């Protein structure tokens, strides 16, 4: 199986739950991560501090958060353990930032997580929900099986208009994320008792080969275009999924492989969440309705100014 070639600038999907794309810029000794293309978490590779008497086990090198950087505000360093080699860490951070400054006009970076784990329909074995993704075969083999979730346990913001119309509250006094829990149950029921999942290697044209049976090549149409399938036989389930994908529209627009029809639809939905659009629009690989999104960004700025 071919390995994805490592580049200094790439993006990966934030999954389970889907929450857009993470931009990554890396050098040998430092890397920068950003979910919006504006504020970057600067991480520096360093030895584990050994302490005064070296009584801590040496765990080799790993990345440590060094600070936050943006073009507007520069580097804001976080408190650092004085046992670190801070001058070397600062030099690595500054070298990274110098390169990153010149890469801002190349955003969004190419999608690099070509290995995908999909939850499968128990009956048809068709992919229904994207569980995980990664860049290399080594990373894939290190991943453990997970259950699909619609939102983080502490995120109570998903509200389905169709469930509300049917009289189901978003918070029943015991569960403050009722609507997300209902969606999770629907998806898991379709997957069946054993929740079958499978890994695939995706080619640039969207086609894939199974990581289990590499002789079989699958067309791009075998996979849902979005991280959750829109193909549901039950009308109520379809309406619930529609509500969820509408809620995720600003983040879904970060995906680079959307068809024109789907991107147009998502743009018209995303403007209902103007402040999220204003935060993420720099990372949209394409914008079709420029006037619509610009109006949403203006509205977001007015809301922010009124709050302040």
Image (cartoon, rainbow, N blue to C red):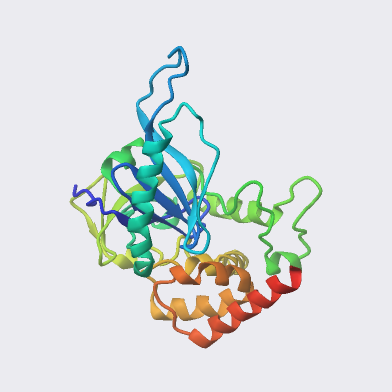
Q: Tell me: residue 194, above or below residue 274.
A: above
- The residue drawn where x is 61% and y is 80% is 298
Can you tell which quarter of the image residue 256 is in?
bottom left
Does residue 130 appear to the left or right of 299 in the view shown? left
Name the foreground residue: 107 vs 72.
Answer: 72
Name the foreground residue: 74 vs 238.
Answer: 74
The location of residue 264, given as percent across then percent down, is 47, 81
Q: Tell me: residue 268, above or below residue 308.
A: below
Tell me if I can see residue 116 in this picture: no
The location of residue 211, given as percent across then percent down, is 26, 46
The location of residue 83, given as percent across then percent down, is 46, 26
Q: Which residue is farthest bottom? A: 291
Q: Which residue is farthest front? A: 87
The location of residue 161, given as percent across then percent down, is 70, 69
Can you tell which quarter of the image residue 84 is in?
top left
Q: Tell me: residue 64, above or below residue 276.
A: above
Tell me if I can see residue 50 in this picture: yes
- The residue drawn where x is 51% and y is 67% is 280
Does residue 105 appear to the left or right of 72 in the view shown? left
- The residue drawn where x is 38% and y is 54% is 97
């Amino acid at each position: 199986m071919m390995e994805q070639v490592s580049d200094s600038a790439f993006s990966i999907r934030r999954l389970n739950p889907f929450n857009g794309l993470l931009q990554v810029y890396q050098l040998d000794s430092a890397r920068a991560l950003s979910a919006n293309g504006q504020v970057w978490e600067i991480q520096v590779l360093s030895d584990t501090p050994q302490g005064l008497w070296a009584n801590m086990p040496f765990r080799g090198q790993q990345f440590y958060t060094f600070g936050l950087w943006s073009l507007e505000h520069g580097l804001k360093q976080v408190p650092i353990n004085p046992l670190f080699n801070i001058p070397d860490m600062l030099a690595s951070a500054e070298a990274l930032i110098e390169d990153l400054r010149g890469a801002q006009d190349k955003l969004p970076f190419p999608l690099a997580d070509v290995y995908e784990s999909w939850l499968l329909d128990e009956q048809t074995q068709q992919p229904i929900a994207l569980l995980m993704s990664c860049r290399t075969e080594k990373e894939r083999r290190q991943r453990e099986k997970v259950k699909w979730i619609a939102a983080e346990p502490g995120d109570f913001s998903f509200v389905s208009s169709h469930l509300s119309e049917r009289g189901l509250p978003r918070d029943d006094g015991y569960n403050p994320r009722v609507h997300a829990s209902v969606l999770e149950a629907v998806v898991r029921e379709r997957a069946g008792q054993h929740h079958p999942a499978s890994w695939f290697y995706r080619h640039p044209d969207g086609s894939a080969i199974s990581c289990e049976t590499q002789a079989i090549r699958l067309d791009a149409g075998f996979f849902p275009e979005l991280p959750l399938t829109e193909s549901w036989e039950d009308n109520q389930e379809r309406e619930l999924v529609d509500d969820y994908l509408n809620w995720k529209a600003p983040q879904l627009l970060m995906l680079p492989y959307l068809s024109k029809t789907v991107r147009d639809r998502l743009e018209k939905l995303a403007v209902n969440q103007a402040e999220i659009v204003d935060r993420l629009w720099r990372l949209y690989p394409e914008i079709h309705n420029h006037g619509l999104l610009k109006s949403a960004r203006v509205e977001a700025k007015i809301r922010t100014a009124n709050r302040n």
